[in-house]
Image (cartoon, rainbow, N blue to C red):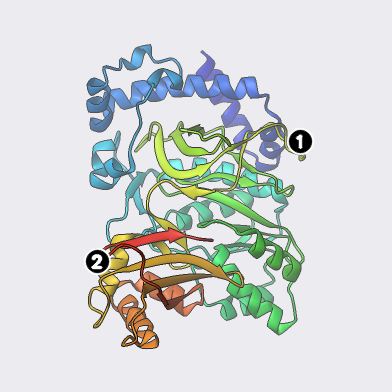
């Protein structure tokens, strides 16, 4: 009965984005929790009867879906990224309409399947979030998020249709071209990767003629406060942080104009923070309530954040999380893309004269990401030649990384360091994020 009421309310409210934007931010928390519990019960029954993966996992964990009333009843049951990566087809509950992939650069991206109806439904809520930030009919939106098989393309196009605005979803074009088109086509809202935005902001600052934008929404990577401050000074508009993953069909949460936490999509997701430390930071775990092609139950994102307590100054009752603090695995998200130790090992393996002991670090200089290779001090090494060799291997092996390098979204550096106390050479690529 409750689900029928909630579905009727959803249908009525989501037909009109302005009406939806008035109602959604002030729904009482108790109603949101009741709605999520009802949807979660349906999801458990749905996956148990249709998904090979969840049928097997529930049986192994001795879970009877009919008796699971709350997500807390699942205990230590989780869906792991490696399972999605290894065999995404085992998750399917019905025939898909399209497939999207993570933007990872390991050669084994995770594939996620959707229906067109799911894309359309979730895009309504993304449209609501953007409308809440100030987009109106008559605005012009330029989306420069990476394209390919990433979910951004279909999601953004559907979102712009629901907003009834002029929009272009063009991918990661050169910054100077984007600057020219912002002027020529009079775009008023920009969706962009933070590191690409830094390059665009340099172009605009040098030109001196700054187009007027309502706001800039960033996604795909963490937004450093230094980048935000610089971009806001140049563009003279709010720069906001969004957060999402391909596995969850893009949008998980985003900042409002107050910029004091990311409001979650509590209408379509249950978001938990697990394994918290003393400061409340833990791993983000997501359950997709609205998906029926490839739903995910308690999916571990590897991203680390914490809940933000209290009401937002904007007045919304929607739960917030902090900006991402780190990742639980050994992946580092930066201007080059998603970087892993094994990827770096493959890059340096063909380089003549590359030392056995080395380390890689991601840092920032003057607001820009730097992928720095650190090698033991040796007078016979020519650092500039090694750097050029690595860049050549990036061109050969990793087209996505190469494109980002050409767009000045990061740079490569090779630096000598003094030997440590360890006398045993190890062929290992430590990868650390020092930003």
Residue 140 shows in the view: no
Image quarter of residue 416: bottom left
Circle 1 residues within 10 Å: few <14, some 14–19, many ≥20: few
Labels 2 and 1: the sequence-earlier one:
1
Percent from the top left, x then y, of residue 302?
Answer: 42, 44
Image quarter of residue 343: bottom left
Left or right: 297, with 325 as reference point: left
Percent from the top left, x then y, of residue 313?
Answer: 77, 39
Q: Does 131 sit above or below residue 388?
A: above
Circle 2 — which element? Answer: loop
Q: Which residue position is annotated with label 1?
A: 315
Depth order, front residue of 164/423 = 423
Depth order, front residue of 52/195 = 195
Left or right: 343, with 290 as reference point: left
Mark-to-mark CA distance, 2 and 1: 57 Å
Q: Does 399 sit above or below residue 290?
A: below
Q: Which mark lies nearer to you, 2 or 1?
A: 2
Determine the residue positioned at 23% across, 44% down: 87
Determine the residue positioned at 61% across, 74% down: 200
Check the picture and name the quadrant holding the C terminus: bottom right
Determine the residue positioned at 77% across, 66% down: 236
Q: Which mark is residue 56?
A: none
Residue 202 shows in the view: yes
Depth order, front residue of 158/321 = 321
Q: Which residue position is annotated with label 2?
A: 425
Percent from the top left, x then y, of residue 125?
Answer: 58, 41
Q: Does 38 sit above or below residue 11?
A: above
Is label 2 in contact with label 1 (beta carbons under 8 Å)? Answer: no
Determine the residue positioned at 63% across, 43% down: 128
Circle 1 — which element? Answer: loop
């Amino acid at each position: 009965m409750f689900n029928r009421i909630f579905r009727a309310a959803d249908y009525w409210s989501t037909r009109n984005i302005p009406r939806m934007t008035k109602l959604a931010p002030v729904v009482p928390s108790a109603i949101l929790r009741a709605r999520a519990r009802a949807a979660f019960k349906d999801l458990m029954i749905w996956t148990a009867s249709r998904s090979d993966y969840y049928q097997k996992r529930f049986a192994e964990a001795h879970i009877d879906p009919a008796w699971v009333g709350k997500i807390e009843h699942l205990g230590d049951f989780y869906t792991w990224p490696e399972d999605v990566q290894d065999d995404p087809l085992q998750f399917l509950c019905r025939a898909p309409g399209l497939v999207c992939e993570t933007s990872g650069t390991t050669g084994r991206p995770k594939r996620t399947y959707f229906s067109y109806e799911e894309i359309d439904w979730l895009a309504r809520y993304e449209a609501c979030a953007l409308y809440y930030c100030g987009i109106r009919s008559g605005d012009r939106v330029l989306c420069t998020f990476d394209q390919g098989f990433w979910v951004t393309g279909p999601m953004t196009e559907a979102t712009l249709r629901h907003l009834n605005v002029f929009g272009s979803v063009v991918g990661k074009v050169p910054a100077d071209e984007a600057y020219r088109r912002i002027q020529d086509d009079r775009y008023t809202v920009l969706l962009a990767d933070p590191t690409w935005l830094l390059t665009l902001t340099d172009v605009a600052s040098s030109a001196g003629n700054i187009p007027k934008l309502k706001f800039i929404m960033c996604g795909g990577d963490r937004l450093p406060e230094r980048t935000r401050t610089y971009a806001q000074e140049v563009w003279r508009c709010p720069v906001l942080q969004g957060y999402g993953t391909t596995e969850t069909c893009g949008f998980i949460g985003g900042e409002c104009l107050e910029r004091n936490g990311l409001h979650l999509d509590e209408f379509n997701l249950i978001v938990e923070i697990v394994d918290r430390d003393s400061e409340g930071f833990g791993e983000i775990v997501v359950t997709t309530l609205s998906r029926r092609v490839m739903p995910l139950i308690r999916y571990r994102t590897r991203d680390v954040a914490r809940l933000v307590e209290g009401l937002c100054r904007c007045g919304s009752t929607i739960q917030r999380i902090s900006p991402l603090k780190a990742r639980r695995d050994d992946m580092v998200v930066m201007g080059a893309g998603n970087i892993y130790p094994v990827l770096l090992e493959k890059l340096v393996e063909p380089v003549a004269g590359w030392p056995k002991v080395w380390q890689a670090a991601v840092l920032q200089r003057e607001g820009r990401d730097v992928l720095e290779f650190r090698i033991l001090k040796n007078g016979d090494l020519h650092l500039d030649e090694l750097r050029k060799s690595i860049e050549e291997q990036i061109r050969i092996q990793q087209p996505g990384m190469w494109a980002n390098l050409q767009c000045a979204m990061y740079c490569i550096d090779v630096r000598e360091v003094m030997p440590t106390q360890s006398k045993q050479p190890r062929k290992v690529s430590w990868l650390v994020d020092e930003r």
